[in-house]
Amino acid sequence: MTANEAIAAVLERDIQMLQWHLGDFTDADMLARPVAGANHAAWQLGHLTLAEFNAGKAVKPGSMPELPAGFADRFAKDKAKSDNPADFPKKAELLAQFERVRRATVAWTKALTPQDYGAPTPEKMQGWAPTIGQLAVALSGHAAMHVGQFQVLRRKLGKPVLF
């Protein structure tokens, strides 16, 4: 297995992890907050999708599928405070959108050359992932961090513990 294949496999597994952790959530569950001030799952999933879309577009222009009109505005940081169901897509749409973007990330990851791994990311990403290789790995870490938050929400909602 090559490094590209290993990173791509982890990125693909994240799709399954998100589907598994959110699979028994209703659309109403997606808007529940584990504690006051915490972000709900609907905003978090949109945020994951938007962050990955922007990262992929920045390091490999043209690699990302288009997002629906207004998607970026719906998942701006200030929108995390909204509890209005009309402000967010349904769970199925959010999962499908994440999967579309993640599959595009997997595609550009599989095409990385050894030189790409050490190439710098755009300046605004330098503190998070200084190189393209580090970015490819960090995207999985970002998804995993949110899965951990979904675990807490699962407990609050009385859902079965998955791990």
Image: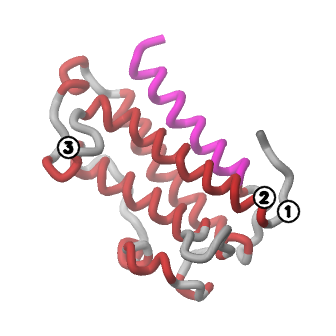
Q: 66 or 18: which is nearer to us?
A: 18
Q: Amino acid at mark 3?
A: Gln
Residue at the spot 71% in from the left edge and 51% down from the top edge: 21
Q: In this picture, is 106 found above or below 100?
A: above
Judging by the rendered image, the residue that carries numbered circle 2 is 155
Which of the two discs, 2 and 3, sits closer to the camera?
2
Q: Which of the 4 image quadrants contains residue 120?
A: top left
Is residue 106 toward the left or the right of residue 85 in the image? left
Ranked by sequence position, the earlier of labels 2 and 3 is 3
Q: Residues within 10 Å of mark 1 (few under 14, many from 20)?
A: few
Residue linked to disc 1: 158
Whether pointer 2 and pointer 3 mark residues with C-beta atoms closer than 8 Å, the reply is: no
Q: Label 3 crowding class (10 Å Cα cut-off): few <14, some 14-19, many 20+?
A: few
- Mark 3 highlights which residue? 126
Q: How far is disc 1 from disc 2 in space, using C-alphas? A: 5 Å
* Label 2 Cα crowd, 10 Å radius (few <14 / some 14-19 / many 20+): few
Reply yes or no: does residue 157 show up in magenta: no
**Are circles 1 and 2 on residues that touch, CB within 8 Å?**
yes
Q: Main secondary structure of the magenta part?
A: helix
| Residue 117 position in % (x across, y down) | 25, 25
Q: Name which quarter of the figure residue 106 lies in.
A: top left
Q: What's the distance in space between the residues labelled 2 and 3, CA to CA?
A: 35 Å
Q: Amino acid at mark 1?
A: Gly
Q: Quadrant of the C terminus?
A: top right
Residue 79: where, in percent of width, then height? Answer: 44, 80
Q: Which residues are magenta?
A: 1-21
> At x 55% / y 79%, what residue is drawn?
88
Q: Position of residue 138 (x, y in %)?
A: 39, 38
